[in-house]
Amino acid sequence: MTVTQEQIEILKSLGTATIHEAQGQCGAFEGTLRAIDPTLRLGGRALTVDCRPSDNLALHYALTKARPGDVLVVDAKGFLEAGPWGDILTLAAIKRGIAGLVISGSVRDANAIIEMGFPVFCMGLSIKGTLKNQPGQVNVPITVGGVIVHPGAVIIGDRDGLVLVEETRVDEVIAASRLREEKETTIRAAIERGESTVDLLGLGDILKKFNMQ
């Protein structure tokens, strides 16, 4: 199945929390991966990168394989004391049409990256540089933020966090997310009318069970 840019834009508009709930509370990355600019949304197909701690040779190689619309998803082994990604790689990524970066490690040059409007999700910031002499792999299954990421999976990110959607489930997840949005719109309208969330969500029996009356 080929995921279209239109589908990715729809998923970005729906938001990560809605998508996560709609697809059965799965696909959420750990909260240690945060946006350096939370005003930006990220969405695209995963181009996976497995690299060594404190070395970014594999990232330079990955840029030669990336296609427009890809999101680089990088297993940097959670190493925080170096920034394998900075403003130069960001500029190169933008020139190739890459949609963003998710890295289980640190980045540097955060202000420059923000000014360029490039979505980055990382575990931290580090001013320390990296080497370029260790091998890595591109487009292989990796684990980042507690999620197994296969090449081509759809990655969506926003202020709330990151979520993965399997390629084969995109249409299903969009439909389920829209239904969830409709349901929440109905709930909000009921709250505006003065109804309680206890009644709307059917929580009366469980509150009674715990003598919370």
Image (cartoon, helix red, strand yellow):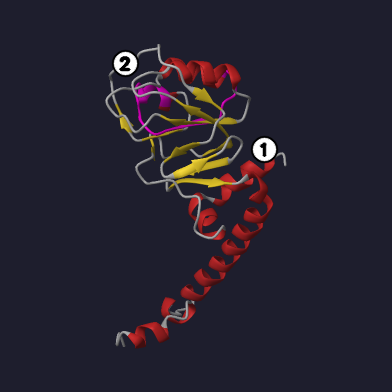
Distance (Cα) linking label 2 and label 1: 34 Å
In the image, the segment drawn in magenta is 95-113
Q: Residue at x 53, y 20 (%)?
A: 62
Query: Neighbour class for label 2 at 10 Å: few (<14), some, many (≥20)?
Result: some
Q: Is residue 44 above or below residue 172?
A: above
What amino acid does circle 2 point to? Gly
Front residue (pair 194, 135): 135
* In the displayed structure image, the side of residue 180 where residue 2 appears, left or right: right
User: Which mark is first along the chain, 1 or 2?
Assistant: 1
* The quarter of the displayed image where residue 194 is located: bottom left
Image spot of residue 49 (x, y percent): 49, 27
Residue 158 in view here: no
Marks 2,1: beta carbons within 8 A: no
Image spot of residue 66 (x, y percent): 59, 23
Is 25 within the magenta?
A: no
User: What is the quadrant of the N terminus in the image?
Assistant: top right
Tell me the number on the disc at residue 129: 2
Query: Neighbour class for label 1 at 10 Å: few (<14), some, many (≥20)?
Result: few
User: What is the quadrant of the C terminus in the image?
Assistant: bottom left
What amino acid does circle 1 point to? Gln
* In the displayed structure image, the side of residue 103 where residue 83 appears, left or right: left
Q: Is residue 147 above or below residue 46?
A: below
The residue singled out by tag 1 in the image is 5
Image spot of residue 207 (x, y percent): 35, 83
Is 102 within the magenta?
A: yes
Q: Residue at x 37, y 31 (%)?
A: 77
Q: Is residue 23 above or below residue 39?
A: below
Front residue (pair 112, 8): 8
Element at label 2: loop
Image spot of residue 170 (x, y percent): 65, 49
Element at label 1: helix
Q: Residue at x 48, y 54 (%)?
A: 17
